[in-house]
Amino acid sequence: LQKCLKIYNIKAKSLEDPDDIGIVVEGVKVLTALGNFSRACSLLIGLAYVLNLAYPKELRYTFEVFQKLLLELDSSKLSPKVNSLRNKLLQIGIMFLT
């Protein structure tokens, strides 16, 4: 299924009001008040994975890197582009083989 997945960040007008960071799927807020961008990214990947949603076409490699390299989910099946990135990261010592 191809769905529109987005992270939103609403900046508060005053210091008393917290910023609101959340996730929108097809124009509907599905998660709100996530606290920070890192948590929102993690939960967005989790939502896409659990709900079996197709990644947005223009971000498919970004999502694949998150899922397969950073989270190590289904990491045995890499696209050629992501595999090339993985090899370059291994060469400069950013990633460790597990």
Image: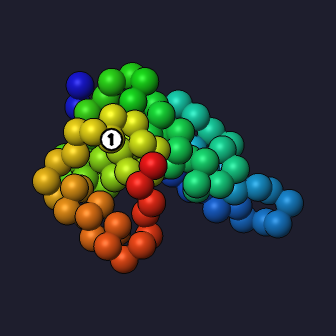
The structure residue drawn at horizontal position 17% and vertical position 48%, both measured from the top left corner, is 79
The structure residue drawn at horizontal position 34% and vertical position 52%, both measured from the top left corner, is 65
Q: Is residue 3 visible?
A: no
**Where is the N terminus found, in terms of image quarters?**
top left
Considering depth in this image, is 5 or 55 the residue closer to the camera? 55
Considering depth in this image, is 82 or 3 the residue closer to the camera? 82
Side (left or right) of 52 relative to 72:
left
Give the residue type at disc 1: Ser
Residue 12, horizontal then vertical, whole percent = 70, 61
Quarter-of-image position of residue 89: bottom left
Q: What kind of element bears circle 1?
A: loop
Q: Residues within 10 Å of mark 1 (few under 14, many from 20)?
A: some
Most extreme residue toward the bottom is 92
Asked if residue 52 is positioned above or below residue 56 in the image, the reply reads above
Residue at numbered disc 1? 75
Residue 53, horizontal then vertical, whole percent = 31, 29
Asked if residue 93 is positioned above or below residue 25 in the image, the reply reads below
Residue 19, horizontal then vertical, whole percent = 69, 56
The structure residue drawn at horizontal position 68% and vertical position 43%, both measured from the top left corner, is 33
* Colour theme: rainbow
